[in-house]
Image: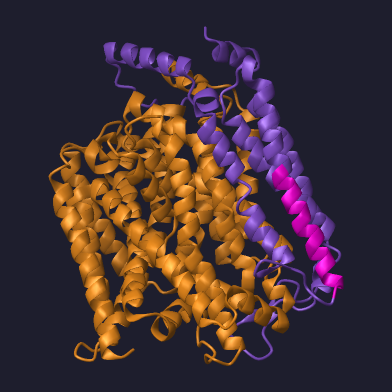
Chain colours: A orange, B purple
Amino acid sequence: MDDHRSLIVLVSVMAYMAMCIGVGIWAMRRTKSTQDFFMAGRHLGIVVAAVAVFSSTMSGWGFVGGPGLVYKMGTSSFWMIICTSIAMSITFFLLGKRLRLLAELRQPISLPDAVAARYGSRSTSLLTAVAILLGVMGYLATQILAMATVLRGIFAEVSWIGEPRLDVCVAISSAVLIFYCVTGGIIASVYTDLVQGIIMVVAAVLVLATAILKVDGGLAGMSQTILADDPEAISPWGTLGMIGCLSWYFIFALGACGQPHVITKLMMTRRVDDARHMLPISVVGYGVSALLWIGIGLAMRTLVLQGIHPELTNADDAAGEFLQNYAHPLLSGIVFAALLAAIMSTADSFLNIGAAAVVHDIPRALRGRSLHNELLWARIATVLIAIVAAVFALSSGDLIALLGAFGWSTFAAAIVPTVAIGFNWKRATSLACNVAIVSSLLMNFGLKWFDVQLPHGFHGGAFSLLVSLTLFFLVSMLSPRESIAADIEEVMDL
Amino acid sequence: MTESAEFAARKPDQWTCTLSVLLVLLWAAVLAVLLTPDVPNGHGFEHSRFPTMDQGGDGALRHGHLLLGGWMLGSVLIVTLVSLLACGTVRRRSATNWRAAAFLVGALSYEGVFGMLCYSYRDSLTQPHAAFIGPFPEPLAWLLFGIWLVPGILVLLYVVFFYYWIWPPDNALRFAELIARSSQTDDSHEPQQDVP
């Protein structure tokens, strides 16, 4: 990158970070209780909540790993994107109303709190919190590492700064994240998500337009080039194949309603009716921001195949290489800010639900009551979790990738039965939830640890989700029917 | 008792029936494909010129024997997803036929598009020149313009029928009464220790 371009990128990223700090300071004055810190006082407007839902779903991995997957595997990863329209529909149909009603009735401040209200079981609440905490640590560590890697790349391009050490970049990026999450809790998180979501949408549209302009023949030119080289790479299944793609479709479509950092936001809106407008906004927002994934991925595969761009040393460099070599400096600045935005919008949600698990859910499940001065402890826990995740990110090598990769599948297999099904199906029992959660943890970790490959590239997480759903159903049917609190039962009838 | 509550009380096991049927269908479809023999390099291998890329190779060789099983698996997944959506709506006698018809139309559209995707892909394996829809080869166009956009029908159903199928006014009234009752009784609602 020339100095002019790298300076614009640096200024854009610094401006974005300054905005995050500003939102943190603004949100601090609105955060007076744990309800505010974890649930935004249930006062979120429609647009803020809807954008927070889609920007939390699209993590930094989507902006970096997504184009890398298209470069490497052709169109296979399109199934992860196209499933979001049905995935978000399922989330809203099954949980949009149900979680919001429960939030007003019992005023939970976390998902395990809602689980405790539904099943009247401390062990189910505890296991849900443990599953969330394990997934959060892995996800958060990967997000922090991604933030630091992006930041180091940006600094390295500025001649008068040079390439800083990775731990310095971890410290800088974590400090910004911690600041606004500690001061403003979920309020700062969702309002930064709003800005982050808008940046992501704008950046995605501009990047797709740039990709179309930079490749001879636009999208049709890309298709022709890839088709001539390997027709399967531009078929609906990409290089992965039909069964692998369909298993991705299953785990990403159904698993979405088990992602705690996303569904928790359904409890934060002002009115039940808000869900009606949130669904289309979230679907469209995610769909537009995913254009970056498609645009850069197809363009880089085409440019390399045409010999215009040298082969990438690593597929994950696709987004960075495209921005450095083909995008206008100002667009590069916006997209790098969008990249940090995508990472941070997911990380801040994880930090918040992780803190809730540590200071609220686990003590409540074990001791039967909350901590005194929970707000103070929530802020302390937020700092500690971020520090532990940052140290974890720097020190544990492959284990982070392992935990990060197993995050989505574990959340899906553990929380889809317990929450998405169990909050609608009265026959579900706490024992069935416990079995589903434990089996999801064991299966997902086991499949990754032993590197088990299923035939036809079938996704291990999809298989694990099917197993946990089956165990959940069978144990529910075989165990004695449990009584449900009268008010909860009435909510389940609505 | 309101109409929706009365109807729900008389047919309480919609979820049980739906889940049992869906799980049987899912296991049948998944086992059918998993037990089909895998071919070498069937899910991608290193590109001959660019090692950081993968390539798919011969589509007929790796998918010819899997197309039927894959189509069945995809169709079952669509049935599963749409059925779960339908279960997430409020059941009321007066609206059941309309509701069922609307979800049936949504599911059939979705299945139709997926069927066209599989059909056009199968055709593309034997035809030397690919047909295009817009800038993409036909099978990929069915994925991007079909599978991605068709669930928009279901989003539309949610928005249009929200006050009929999701949050009817009588449910809102019942909930307001529940909240009023709940604020009068000062329960702590602490979760119980598990009873053995």
Query: Magenta span has A445?
Result: no
Q: Residue B7: x percent and y percent?
A: 61, 13
Q: Residue at position x 54%, y 90% from top?
A: A311
Quadrant of res A348: bottom left
One can see residue B183 in this view: yes
Q: Residue visible at 68% across and 28% down?
A: B100
Tell me residue A34's x, y (percent): 22, 38
* Left-right relation of A169 to A275: left
- Secondary structure that dominates the magenta span: helix
Left or right, residue A391 beside residue B130: left
Task: Work out whether residue B12 can be spotted.
Answer: no
Question: In the rendered view, does B56 fall on the left or right side of A32?
Answer: right
In the image, what residue occupies the spot 69% across and 65% down? Answer: B140
Please identify the quarter of the rendering in which residue B99 is found. top right
Residue under the point 30% across and 67% down: A390
Rendered image quadrant of residue B130 = bottom right
In the picture, measured across the screen, residue A394 lies left or right of residue B73, that is: left
Measured from the top left, where is residue B162 in percent x and y?
Answer: 50, 29
The image shows residue A409, relative to residue A229, as above or below, that is above
Q: Which residues are magenta?
A: B109-127
